[in-house]
Image (cartoon, rainbow, N blue to C red):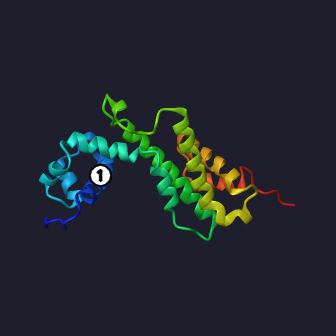
């Protein structure tokens, strides 16, 4: 392995945390420090210069992935699309991927998970995150406002609800199908 490029400590820490979540999803808490080092492009010993233990690293990576702003940042980072359908598919994919990741990561939390700063347990925090999520969705579809039957703000709620609700269908509904239902309804247009 070649030596990693020098980075300020805060950037190195973030790079390691970025590399850990996909490994946790693949291997759970059994991920090795060797796998983490390889994915981060660092020597294994560097992990312990940045984190006190593998457990601390894993807990911080999970807490960061579960942070209230994570999905909002992902939604705001979506590239603008000329096509409304493609925009809605991107939004639904982002929301459902985030929800699946969240559920998988929650299962990896330690028993004393209350010590981790994630998702805010109070109603005001949940409401504020929900409002910010709806705003990010509305902003993403706003360029297509002329094609919507309702305002982007009014359309954001059904997009969020259908995205999360589709995860509980058996089999799970794919984002393309959810986008079709949102945009065109459940029925075929009547010929006439």
The C terminus, quarter of image: bottom right
Q: Please tell me how crowded label 1 is: few (under 14), some (14-19), or many (20+) other residues with Cα within 10 Å.
A: many
Which one is in front, 124 or 158?
A: 124
Q: Is residue 111 left or right of residue 69?
A: left
Instruction: Let me know if residue 149 appears in the view.
Output: yes
Residue 151 location, x and y as percent? 72, 56
> What residue is rendered at 13% in x and 64% in y?
1
Q: Secondary structure at mark 1?
A: helix
> What residue is rendered at 15% in x and 48% in y?
48
The part of the image, by quadrant, that contains residue 191 is bottom right
Q: Is residue 63 left or right of residue 132?
A: left
Q: Is 44 above or below relative to 104?
A: below
Residue 137 location, x and y as percent? 59, 55
The part of the image, by quadrant, that contains residue 55 is top left
Q: Is 164 above or below relative to 189?
A: above
Which one is in front, 26 or 128?
A: 128
> What residue is rendered at 20% in x and 46% in y?
51
Residue denoted by label 1: 17
Residue 100 location, x and y as percent? 45, 44
Q: Residue furthest bottom?
A: 82
Residue 119 location, x and y as percent? 45, 39
Q: How many marks?
A: 1
Q: Residue furthest top?
A: 111
Which one is in front, 93 or 80?
A: 80
Q: Is residue 83 left or right of residue 119?
A: right
């Amino acid at each position: 392995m070649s030596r990693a490029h020098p980075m300020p400590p805060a950037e190195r820490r973030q790079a390691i945390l970025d590399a850990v979540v996909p490994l946790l999803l693949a291997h759970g808490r059994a991920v090795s420090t060797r796998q983490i080092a390889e994915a981060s492009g660092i020597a294994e010993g560097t992990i312990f210069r940045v984190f006190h233990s593998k457990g601390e690293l894993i807990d911080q990576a999970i807490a960061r992935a579960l942070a209230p702003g994570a999905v909002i940042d992902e939604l705001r980072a979506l590239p603008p699309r000329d096509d409304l359908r493609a925009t809605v598919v991107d939004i639904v994919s982002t929301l459902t991927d985030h929800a699946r990741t969240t559920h998988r990561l929650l299962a990896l939390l330690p028993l004393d998970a209350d010590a981790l700063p994630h998702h805010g347990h109070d109603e005001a925090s949940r409401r504020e995150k929900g409002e910010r999520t709806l705003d990010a969705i509305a902003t993403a579809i706003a360029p297509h406002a002329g094609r919507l039957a309702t305002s982007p703000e009014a359309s954001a709620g059904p997009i969020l609800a259908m995205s999360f609700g589709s995860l509980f269908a058996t089999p799970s509904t794919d984002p393309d199908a959810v986008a079709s239902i949102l945009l065109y309804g459940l029925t075929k247009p009547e010929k006439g």
